[in-house]
Image (spheres, helix red, strand yellow):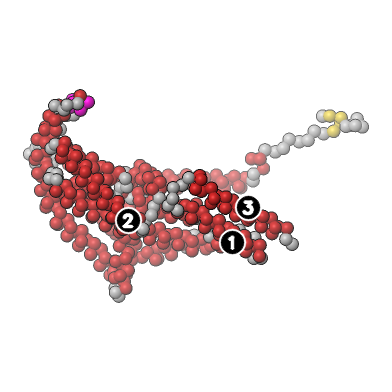
Amino acid sequence: MSASQNGTPSAQPEPATPAWQRVPLRQIALGTALVALIVCGCVLVLALRSVFLLLFLGIVLATALSPLFERLRAAGLSRNLAAITTFLLLLTFLGGVLALIIPFFVAQLGAAATSLPQRYASFLDMLAHAPFRLVRDLRPLLPNDPFVPMQGDGALSPDMGEALPPLLRGLASGALVLLLSFYWLSYRALAIQSVALLIPLNLRTQATEIWNEIEAKIGAFVRGLAILSISIAVLSFAGYSLIGLPGALTIALIAGLLEAVPYVGALVTMVIAAMVGLAISPEKALLAVVVANIVQAIEGSIVVPRAMDRTVGVNPVVTLLALALFGELFGLVGALLAVPLAAALQVLLDRFVLRGPAPESMEIGGRDQLALLRYRAQDLASDLRQQVRSKGAEITPEADAGEEELESILTDLDSVLSAAQEQTP
């Protein structure tokens, strides 16, 4: 306590109340409940990620089949009959392809299983007599006869018995995906409308547009991927057969399937082909690598621009992030679905991060002439940012200096116009 000028004591000012004590208890409770709901939602999504993955697979398949479904609908078929016809045609096509491939595939696998031990022994002998010590040092690290468990009396081994439950689960999951696709084709509009009713009225139109854009991009990707995978499989089979590589059909089928895994699939196929060729001779391995590179060159210059780039257009960075994330969460299936999931993520990024605000959401502060000028300045700045992101030239600070300066001028102009609006009575 201190004294004033007339000698009377003056009271000390009370200390300020901490900020957290001024927050109402109801607001603290609501915030805590919101955080708890978010955490529980994340845990639930992780726990049920397999279910969500199957649902997404069903929607992806239905989206890819939607053009055929819509053509059947335009021909006068009902929704259920069009969906049934679509899946009958799909199953007929897949059954015909499998009927043509499986006999040849089984024959090649049988021949490979018979000759594999001998080729492996030749490969070990080649390593042992290699001219380089580094290569010779690899020989002791490899087993002498890893194919002993493959020999037997043909009875069902315990390992095969343990593999049956996962196989049955895989078949059940495949059937569930087909059912989900069927119901999504038949009741897509009703499902979207039902979900839209849970969204606030002012956001329903935007949410529906985003979902339609995601579906269009994913459908284009799946149809393009089907063309791409078939093309890669045919080219690989022709190339590997031409150089006399054993198991050419098997490697070609692997190449077609792994084409769905961006960047990694082609490398894995090349390694497999090189290892099969190396079991025969180094020259055969080199020819296998050459064939794989020729196939990738044809893919990059001819097939991909026509089948994928114009319809999907997913940013490579987004693709790599999706590949790492969903591959970690869902394994091989997640890696196969990395690009369609990246396409959905790309749409969300374009809408909420990269793309400028919609005209109706721009803050222009009224309907007078100043508001019109603010609208035009903001719209021009948004168009400028979009043009900078989509230009094909190399991005350098010098090349972008003009665009950044113009965007800064437009931002300052919007601030000046906003200040003028506040001063206008």
State the residue position of label 1: 376
Q: Quadrant of the N terminus?
A: top right
Circles 1 and 2, Cβ within 8 Å, touching? The answer is no
Give, as a single range, the part of the protein colored magenta.
134-140
The answer to which of 260 and 202 lies nearer the viewer is 260
Residue 305 shows which numbered tag? Answer: 2
From mark 3 to mark 1, how far is it between C-alphas? 13 Å
State the residue position of label 3: 412
User: 410 above or below 265?
Assistant: below
Left or right: 269 in relation to 34: left
Q: Is residue 71 magenta?
A: no
Disc 2 residue crowd, few under 14, some 14–19, many 20+, Cα 10 Å: few
Q: Which of marks 3 and 2 is nearer the N terminus?
A: 2
The three-letter code of the residue at mark 1 reads Arg
| Callout 1 secondary element | helix
The three-letter code of the residue at mark 3 reads Asp
Left or right: 167 in relation to 390: left
The answer to which of 90 and 385 lies nearer the viewer is 385
From mark 1 to mark 2, how far is it between C-alphas? 36 Å
The answer to which of 273 and 342 lies nearer the viewer is 273
| Callout 3 secondary element | helix
From mark 3 to mark 2, how far is it between C-alphas? 41 Å
Q: Does the magenta stretch include residue 137?
A: yes
The secondary structure that most of the magenta stretch takes on is: helix
